[in-house]
Amino acid sequence: MRTLGVPRHRDEVVRLQRSEGWYVGRVFAVVSGAIVLVFTLSMLSKAANVPTQPMGAHMEVTFHASPAPGDRERADAIVSAARTVMQRYPTVADAERAGFTKFLPRTELPIEHYTNGAFAREAWMGHFDPAHPTSLIFERGSDGLRLVGVMYTAPNRATREQLNAAVPLSFGTWHRHVNFCVPPAGTERSDITGPSARFLFGTIASADECASAQGQFVPRVFGWMVHVWPLEHDPAKIWAVDRGEGMGGHDTMMGDGAPHAYDRLPIALDRLPQLTVAAGEPTSGATVFAVHCAECHGVGGRNGPDAPALAGIGIAPGQVAYMVRHPKAIDPISEMPELPLTDRELADVAAYVASLRK
């Protein structure tokens, strides 16, 4: 089987491009080209300690925040500016004339990012300007590329407060790509792209695993990113992490493709906050759970069609209470409603879920 390594020189890149069958997928193209510069910038920028939650093995997202005074007005102003940008550069030709270039020039994707280097540098320096998005996002269809959204960026060193100052976290969800393992020379194509891939956005997701595979581990790829889809009408879709399912998984650009699994919580249990909650009565809580929760979480919390399993995971009553009161803070793509439970009902259902066994 033919093997491919990461190109080290321009001549090798040209040779590979000209060879028959040269194509290892959109992620490998990132490694062989533009990502080299971004790796350097990512490594030089010390990351601030921003609380995040994982979305799959290779992406982390900011927690949703409770609305603060002025958030809606700020969010609406950003969306309005983004719409003006889209009117200014409605086609690829318009975008290219304004200095936007295709991020992966030799790879066709369903969603294409056209990036402006000057705007990207401006954002990297910590200046947020809604009239200067780092990228314009085009969707590929039968009639060509259609502009559907914009992407703003921020450096890894940005704090949660700085991210919130740029885009209110009660509306937008900043995300960044993590746990990237660059393959060593001679790596087989199947280990770089495809369903069984180990490297890049494959199954390797830790420094130790990457070292064992003789790869180069990059903890953070690029900086922070936030998408805006101004043509949508539902706020959840306007501020979705990715285009498609409201606040769906980010898999169109980098090929993460990790499903939002329902066999586990969307956040590690030791990172799930707690609320102070009174001691509850599990028997009464079972009735509350059956009425409000079982349809999604399943009978006895043993998994359902639309929510993670709760039985036997060791969750504390205060953590259950936090999930009930702040579902979007735990999972930005959650469809769990804010249940209108009284404090007594909350205490009871929290006690019941904490008592569940497999």
Image (cartoon, rainbow, N blue to C red):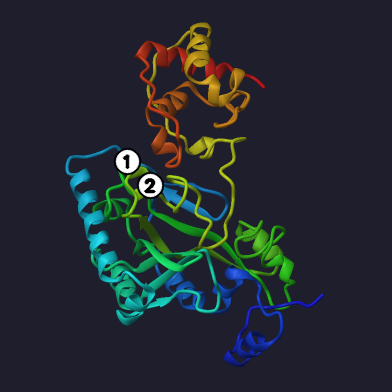
Residue displayed at 59% across by 30% down: 305
Disc 1 crowd rating (10 Å Cα; few below 14, some 14-19, many 20+) is: some
Q: Quadrant of the C terminus?
A: top right
Residue 22 vertical position relative to residue 129 in the rendered view, above or below: below
Residue with the most extreme front position: 143
Q: Position of residue 217 (x, y in %)?
A: 59, 66
For label 2, the SS is helix
Left or right: residue 348 versus residue 295 is left
Q: Which residue is mark 1?
A: 65
Ranked by sequence position, the earlier of labels 2 and 1 is: 1
Amino acid beneath label 2: Lys
Residue displayed at 61% across by 18% down: 299
Q: Position of residue 336 (x, y in %)?
A: 44, 30
**Number of the front mark, 2 or 1:** 2
Left or right: residue 194 versus residue 77 is right
Q: Which residue is mark 2?
A: 237
For label 1, the SS is loop
Disc 2 crowd rating (10 Å Cα; few below 14, some 14-19, many 20+) is: many
Name which quarter of the figure residue 307 lies in: top right
Left or right: residue 353 versus residue 190 is left
Residue 247 vertical position relative to residue 120 in the rendered view, above or below: above
Q: Relative to the observer, which residue lies in front, 321 or 25?
A: 25
Q: Quadrant of the N terminus?
A: bottom right
Q: Relative to the observer, which residue lies in front, 323 or 272?
A: 323
Name which quarter of the figure residue 134 lies in: bottom left
Q: Relative to the observer, which residue lies in front, 279 or 286?
A: 286
- In contact (CB < 8 Å): disc 2 and disc 1: no
Amino acid beneath label 1: Ala
Residue displayed at 61% across by 65% down: 200
Q: Position of residue 19 (x, y in %)?
A: 69, 87
